[in-house]
Amino acid sequence: MDESADAASATATPPARTEADAEAFYRAEHPRLWAYLTRACRDRAMAEEIAQESFVRLLASRGATLAPEARRGYLYRIAENLRIDLARRRTRERAAPVDEAEAIAAPDADRADAPRSASRTTAAAFAALDERDRRLVWLAHVEEWSHAEIGRLLGYATASVKVALHRARRRLAERIEEENRK
Amino acid sequence: MTTPSDATSVERTEAGIDAALRELAATTFAEAPSPPPFAVVRLFAERRREEAHQRRALRGLALASALPLVAVGIAALVAPLPASDARGFAALVAAFGAAALAASAGALRRWIAAGRG
């Protein structure tokens, strides 16, 4: 989808201003945002915190009156900024002990008691990707965002998103293959 | 190094990536905690908005409090009074200045406290 199409769809949809619309948006988007953040940050507690704070900030801002597509972009932008802030703070504090850091690295991938299912293999392979690849793949293939939308959120050119996404998919395929060999 | 058989294998795996990601997404969504009640999030947002409004108001008050002092200072520079009137004028400026400084200092202190809170 190009810029003009995005702008047209954003203006064509009437902005959601009623409380019911806001609540429906919250109910639909909260789990999706949490899932994205969980897979991007590999930290469920952090994802939960960021998701809630993102909605608080969205509702307190004028972004809450945007059309749904634009509002979703605005919400994810808030979440991205919060995620970056928290990651920086965590790096500065270096509070997480080694064991905790390892648990964060693969939240559900390497639990010894869990059976090794296809989903677990994918989870392990996905967790092994670097952060940028995880965000790209999730937004493109789970959230089904356009390259332009992803570029706007992550600050890349649309063409760069396409190339980076192709490489990220390739790396994911290789990781899955490696996991299957284990 | 990637051998031809490895490459074929990777392509085969890649073909199944969409299905694998769909499954991963479904698993992740199923694990998502139920979100806090919307009313609670709305309440926090309203409080946040009120705080922002209060900060803006305090900033305005701080600026407005300093204005008389600035105005008197500019007037003194633009149109200085004759020496005979200067003592009375200086007293007036000092009184104005003290009042404005006290008010703006108070407003600034509240503004900073609100920002920290």
Image (cartoon, rainbow, N blue to C red):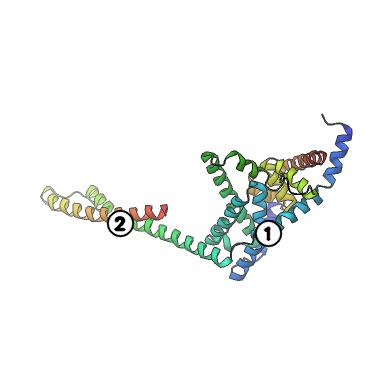
Q: CA distance from mark 2 to mark 1?
A: 46 Å
Mark 1 surroundings: few (<14), some (14-19) or many (≥20) residues within 10 A: few
Which residue is drawn at the image coordinates 55% and 63% (left, top)? B41
Q: Secondary structure at mark 1?
A: helix
Front label number (2 vs 1): 2
Query: Residue at the front extreme?
Result: A113
On the rendered structure, is B44 left or right of B62? right
From the viewer's side, name the closer residue of A23 and A121: A121
Residue under label 2: B65
Which residue is drawn at the image coordinates 41% and 57% (left, top)? B55
Q: Quadrant of the C terminus of chain A?
A: top right
Q: Which label is found at residue A8?
A: 1
Q: Position of residue A47 (x, y in %)?
A: 61, 52
Q: Position of residue B90 (x, y in %)?
A: 16, 50
Q: Which amino acid does the dot numbered 2 rest on?
A: Ser
- Chain at tag 2: B
Q: Quadrant of residue A23?
A: bottom right
From the viewer's side, name the closer residue of A110 and A142: A110
